[in-house]
Each structure stands twice: as structure tokens, then as C-alpha cells.
Amino acid sequence: MSHTGSVLCLNLLLFLHVVAHFRNNAQQQWPVPYRRVDSRPAADSFCEALFPFCPTGDGDGRIPSMRDSDVISVYRLQTPVWEFKYGDLLGKLHIMHDAIGFSSSETGSNFTVEWYELFQLGNCTFPHIRPEEYAPFWCNQGAACFFGGIEDLHWSQNGTLEKIGELTGNQFNDMAQWVQDDNETGIYYETWTVRSDPSPNATVWFESYDCSQFVHRTYRKLTELGAKLSSKSQTNYTKIYLFSGEPTYLGNDSSIFGQPALKNLAGDIRTFYHTFRPHQTFVDFAVSLLEAYEKVVLEKSFYLYYNFEYWHLPMKPPYIQITYEEVPLP
């Protein structure tokens, strides 16, 4: 490399270091606010779901209008993830899925609304490493699904089906419009909540954006509209935590994977995510577990993708934790 090229590379690295330092120390807000978009883009055809998204309902979250004279019952719904396939297996680990049910007193019709991954949890948590694309490829959209009926046995057998309040028809219609607006602008699923440590006063670096967060947002909107919500049981929800020191901002696809000077960082990110690639053989999976342990626990390193940007997490014990903790109704 020529002297001029070396100087340019050095200047670029210094510039990126200053930008990262400025973001992390002068302006950075914790937790990092979830970035919304103006409108939902179409999903890439490369992304495929093992189980179709919203197979019997409206995948755009559209909800029919109710008469103002109607009284709409509100139900808290919770069941183990993939209960339809594995029964209560994941429920024993407190890995639960959340939704909201509604019932019309005038028509007797029941409805369910939920928000979840378009292409299953694994695709929303880790990307694909494609030979033809240097940057990792993400299939991490999530969306609202509205469908007729409440599958009583599905929710009550191993989970929760509990009436928690009532709405007028107008309140329901206002909520329905809010769900569509929320669904159009909040488009990507985020599995992890990242905190500084497990203590109650820990700093939260990043919040998750998942099915339970949709339920909490909807409950808050319902109370804003005047609904009174209450539960006779403890309202617990699944949280998946990563624990780290203060994260370092790295950049987006073009700033990392489009810069020759950052090829080592780009390669490290690709190598990290390759460990978590889908469709591995049993032997490959066993090797990947060892590689993940080495990277996350021994090297104390994790790359997080949030708001279409990459962050480095300096990991701390206990590294990762799944909890089932109470979040009171608003």
C-alpha cells in the first residue's frame, strides 16, 4: 500500500473511532430507542417461514369496526411457545407467547390479536451468512396478526385465558386503528433485552421488541382510551437477557462491510454469526456450541444488531438469563 493509501486508511479509522466515542459518550441515550419506519417494506423473497405467518387471519393487523353500543370483553392470553407442536415443554422453561383476546357482547364473535415473527424466532435472532453477500442477511421482521375466534384449549390448557376488562365499541375501534399504525411503523423483532447486570437498578442498554412488548403497548393504549384493566393472577412474562458492560456502536452495513479498512471487524462479525447459522448437522451444532461458549463466555464478546446497526457488547456474568417476571397491568 502506498503512503497516501496508508494515511487515508489511518484517517478513516481515526474518524470512525471519534464518531463511535462521540455517540457513546456525548449523545447516547440508554436504552437505545427503538427506531420506527415510515411504512413497512415487503419482506425479501429469500426469507422463508417454517410455519406460515398468520395462516387464518389478517397479516396486516386489520380489525373490523364495532358499534359503539357494543361491550367488548378483553382477555389476557398466554401459552408456551410452539405449544401446538411441543405441548408444555417450553412452558416448563417459562418461554411463553402472549396475545390479547376480544369478545363482542352484541354479536358473540371472538377475536385474537398477536404480534410475532414472520420467519420464526431463530431468523429474528441471528442472520443468514450468504456467500454472495458480504454483509449478514436478516429476516427479522415481526408483525401483528388478527384472526377470528379464541382457541380456548390452546391458551388455557398450559397457559392463561383470563378476562381482564371491558371496552366500548368506540374504544375498540380506536385501539384497532392504533394497532394498524403501530404495525406499519414498528417492523422488526428483537429477542434480547440487554442490561448491565441482573440487579433491579441495572442500566438497560437495549429493550426487546417481541410479542409481550406488543401486549404491554396495547394494554397501555387501552388505559389511555379509558379502559380499566385488572387481573386476579400475577401477570408474568418471558424476558431473555444478555448482560454486558457499556456497548460500543460499530456502524451499519455500508459503513462496516463497505470499507476495506474495516475488513477485520466485518470478518469477525461474519464469523460470530456463522456460529449460529441455521440448518446445522448434529456434529456442526456441537462444534458451534463450543465456539459460542468460547466467544461469549471466554472472550466476553457479542455482536448485537439493533435499529439496522451493529453494536459490540463486552459480556459479563451471568452472560444470558431467561426469566419469567411480573409486569403489572397499567
Image (cartoon, rainbow, N blue to C red):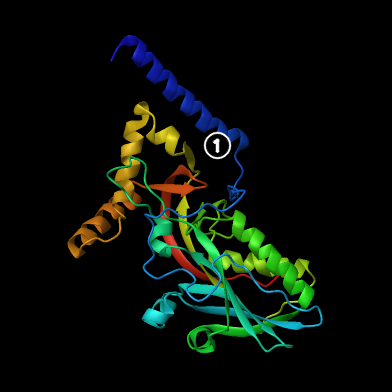
Q: Could one spot residue 280 in this view of the protein?
A: yes
Q: Position of residue 267 (x, y in %)?
A: 31, 38
Q: Position of residue 207 (x, y in %)?
A: 55, 55
Quick one: quadrant of the C terminus?
bottom right
In terms of depth relative to the viewer, which is nearer, 18 or 298? 18
Residue that lies at the very extreme toward the left in this rendered image: 283
Place residue 28 in its image quadrant.
top right
Are there few (<14), some (14-19), or many (20+) residues within 10 Å of tag 1?
some
Q: Amino acid at mark 1?
A: Asn
Horizontal side of 273 relative to 320 (left or right) equals left
Q: Secondary structure at mark 1?
A: helix
Horizontal side of 248 relative to 272 (left or right) equals right
Place residue 263 in its image quadrant.
top left
In terms of depth relative to the viewer, which is nearer, 300 or 147? 147
Residue pictured at 57% horizontal, 84% vertical = 150
Residue marked by disc 1: 24
Q: Could one spot residue 220 in this view of the protein?
A: no
In terms of depth relative to the viewer, which is nearer, 174 or 265? 174
Q: Is residue 147 above or below residue 284?
A: below
Numbered disc total:
1
Residue pictured at 78% horizontal, 68% vertical = 225
Q: Position of residue 310 (x, y in %)?
A: 45, 43
Residue pictured at 56% horizontal, 31% vertical = 22
Q: Position of residue 124 (x, y in %)?
A: 43, 58
Horizontal side of 22 relative to 171 (left or right) equals left
